[in-house]
Amino acid sequence: MEQAEIRHNWTHEQVKALFDMPFNDLLFKAASIHRQHFNPNEVQISTLLSIKTGACPEDCKYCPQSGHYKTDLERERLMEVEKVVEQARAAKSKGATRFCMGAAWSDPKDRDMPYIERMVREVKELGLETCMTLGKLDNDKAKQLRGAGLDYYNHNLDTSPEYYEQIITTRTYQDRLDTLDHVRDAGMKVCSGGIIGMGEQASDRYGLLIQLANLPKQPESVPINMLVKVKGTPLENVDDLDQFEFIRTIAVARIMMPKSYVRLSAGRTAMNEQMQSMCFFAGANSIFYGDKLLTTDNPEADADMNLIRKLGMRPEQAQDYSDEAYEASLSSAIADKKTSELFYEAT
Ligand code: SF4
């Protein structure tokens, strides 16, 4: 079997050659590499709570949370620490091991830091791993967050450097790369991916994956989002991407980043079960679970668990593989939809 190799020198021609492979050959190659590092029948499940929603000063053209566009989104101020901890406790009681918190900010301000650090510390004290997505980070803030105990930081590159200015003008690609450096230097794990189906060319999809794979250390987690076209955003009428192209992107991401978790993120609502299953075969091994993915629809939580069960897969955190333990983990995840509505499923 072909051995997976972690490389940081991918070229455009090499990535194009992967995308151009016959579909079955590409999926076979990706699935073979996936099995070298992961159990192909396990899926890691993440949950994200929006701790501050909307009114973001950035102008990301896909995002209903941007204050530049008029969408139906309801804005919410920074959530109180106690409420966040309450939600984290509820998530833990349902078997969550990692709790992600997202704020629609350009960057966290000095005045926010004491609250944010307290959130991290108190969520961590519950015995949960912590993850945040708060926008741009400088060196000092990255160190502060790490000092408070933050384990993971999410910051997406979104698209290729060439297409980037068509999508965001309020911060640069280099700003994003710098944030990832600061996160890594501070000792946190990196979650970074992008969005496809934003009207970009195939070469932009290659470019995004090349940027991610050629980072000095590949991100531990790579969310691949399919654009969700939200009314009121500039991308609301962009042409649909061929779904096979999405599956190919997952497969190529798996081949280029063999040890990273490749996450199916926003856009799953538009994918039927068969398509999601093909993505799992192509090497996706993480999903966001629950009723919402930030501010866009996400497949119903129990539909997710039913699909996982139908495929003979299981949530990664279920270490006890007895039938009883499996059923217990499924029912605890499915139970109490009321609480799951409070969660937005992650980036
Ligand atoms: S993607 Fe993030 S930074 Fe961009 S507008 Fe939305 S919330 Fe703000």
Image (tube, rainbow, N blue to C red):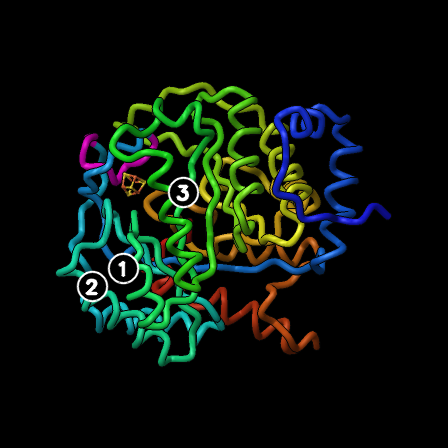
* Label 1 vs label 2, nearer the camera: 1
Measure how far apart labels 2 and 3 are at the Cα level.
22 Å
Q: Position of residue 297 (x, y in %)?
A: 39, 43
The circle on residue 336 is none
Q: Position of residue 338 (x, y in %)?
A: 35, 63
- Residue 251 lies in quadrant: top right
Looking at the image, tell me whether mark 1 or mark 3 is earlier in sequence order. 1
Image-based side of 196 in relation to 254, left or right: left
Q: Amino acid at mark 1?
A: Lys
Task: Give the quadrant of ligand 1.
Answer: top left
Magenta highlight range: 62-70
Is 64 in front, or is 16? 16
Q: Position of residue 69 (x, y in %)?
A: 21, 30
Vertically, is 81 above or below 310?
below
Which residue corresponds to mark 3? 177
Q: Position of residue 10 (x, y in %)?
A: 63, 35
Measure how far apart labels 1 and 2 are at the Cα level.
8 Å
Tell me the residue at 74%/38% (across/down).
27
Circles 2, 3 touching at the beta carbon (< 8 Å): no
Measure how far apart labels 1 and 3 are at the Cα level.
16 Å
Is 80 in front, or is 20? 20
> Could you classify mark 3 by the number of other residues whose Cα lies within 10 Å: few (under 14), some (14-19), or many (20 or more)?
some
Q: Amino acid at mark 3?
A: Leu
Looking at the image, tell me whether mark 1 or mark 2 is earlier in sequence order. 2
Tell me the residue at 35%/80% (across/down).
125
Which residue corresponds to mark 2? 113
Tell me the residue at 53%/70% (across/down).
331
Tell me the residue at 30%/23% (across/down).
234
The circle on residue 141 is 1
Vertically, is 280 above or below 11?
below
Image-based side of 174 in relation to 21, left or right: left
